[in-house]
Amino acid sequence: MGLLDKEFAESNIVITKAEDLMNWARLSSLWQLGFGLACCAIEMMATSASHYDFDRFGVIPRPSPRQADIIIISGTVTLKMATRIKRLYEQMPDPKYIISMGSCANCGGPYWEHGYHVLKGIDRVIPVDVYVPGCPPRPEALLEGLLKLQEKIRHESMVKKTV
Amino acid sequence: MKSHEEILEILKTKFGEAIIGMMEDTKNDPTIIVDSTKILEVMQFLYDDENLSFDSLMNLSGVDDANGEKVKDEAENEIIKGGTLSVYYHLYSMRIKHKITIRTSVPRENPELESVENIWKTADWHEREAYDMYGIIFKNHPNLIRILMPYDWEAGYPLRKDYKNPEYYKGMKVPY
Ligand code: SF4
């Protein structure tokens, strides 16, 4: 169970697995690369703003990929941008996570057929952890995506490889 | 304020042959067709003249008229030979509050005309876009490079009607 179970019963001593502690710390402070692409980015900004308050999950936008744990691909990825996104991703330190937000980033969205300039899915360039469907997804949907990612991190192991 | 007929008359008396006429059967704004070799002089006049004073270039865009002959190339792809590409200039005078559209056509095989960047700075990026999308060359443009597509895009000009998208760009698959 949770980390703080025994806090009060046994006078401020917490007993837990090191792995759980690490995972709990990591999933509670997912710093996001401040990065938005198209219409979906507006929705991502709304999620960050006071009404939905991304901050309560520990998601803070960072200006540098070196300080980021997670990158939200929020919008249409053009071929020109894809090369830049790849570089940003490679600049992020491990462990790093990716949320693909919206139909465009998932599969090309409305540009799937005639978008001569659009990459049909960001997963052709970098590995995606969570796909959030919608055009654009509502802030609630993005929050759900983040909770799914937290769930994934919670079950990760430092010794065993997780799938 | 001048009507489009009056503007056409002023241009005709000044430039004669270089003004080809009014575009017929269009539902759009009144459009005057101008010879592409004289475009810079005509535009400069529209800007300078006291009674016209077109101080704002609202928009400049390329168009593929696709009026050439459709043929098959060696790889069995349909391409267009001959015909024209066009450039449309939407002008507005903020002082007099009248507007007009100018159209000029260049041959598809050699799409070259003078840049109007010297007259309206707006034209800088608009001409780059027309170059990027249609391959229209604007002579004496200070920096005619692609503006939207990647700088190293080699597959051609995407808004031409016979454009074929490549299979791969830098190892990324392009079609769905
Ligand atoms: S998925 Fe829809 S809302 Fe999001 S970037 Fe694409 S077109 Fe815009």
Image (spheres, coloured by chain):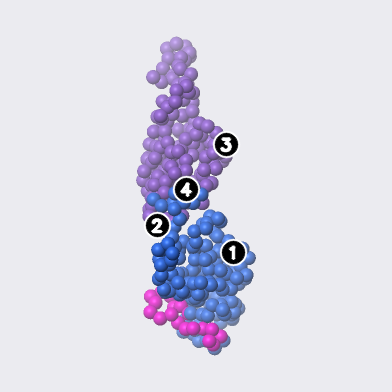
Chain colours: A purple, B blue
Do the residues indicated by labels 1 and 3 lie within the same chain of the protein?
no
Which residue is rendered at x = 40% and y = 54% of the image?
A111
Which tag is nearer the camera, tag 1 or tag 3?
Answer: 1
The CA span between labels 2 and 3 is 36 Å
- Using the image as rendered, state which of residue B144 and residue A103 is in the foreground: B144
The CA span between labels 1 and 3 is 36 Å
* Amino acid type at mark 1: Leu
Q: Is residue B18 above or below residue A149?
A: below
- Label 1 sits on residue: B144
Q: Secondary structure at mark 1?
A: loop
Mark 2 belongs to chain: A
Residue B172 — which label? 4
Q: Secondary structure at mark 3?
A: helix
Percent coordinates x, y for residue A115 in the rendering: 42, 55
- Label 2 sits on residue: A114
Q: Is residue A45 above or below residue B50?
A: above
Question: What crowding class fits label 2: few (fewer than 14 Cα within 10 Å), some (14-19), or many (20 or more)?
Answer: few
Percent coordinates x, y for residue B169 in the rendering: 49, 51
The CA span between labels 3 and 4 is 25 Å
Percent coordinates x, y for residue A101 in the rendering: 42, 43
Which residue is rendered at x = 47% and y = 40% of the image?
A126
Mark toward the start of the polypeptide (4 vs 1):
1
Q: Secondary structure at mark 4?
A: strand
Mark 1 belongs to chain: B
> In this picture, which residue range is highlighted in magenta?
B15-32
Is the distance from the Cβ of mark 4 to the nearest ligand 1 atom less than 8 Å?
Answer: no
Callouts 2 and 3 close, C-beta under 8 Å: no
* Amino acid type at mark 4: Met
- Label 3 sits on residue: A66
Which residue is rendered at x = 53% and y = 46% of the image?
A84
Callouts 1 and 3 close, C-beta under 8 Å: no
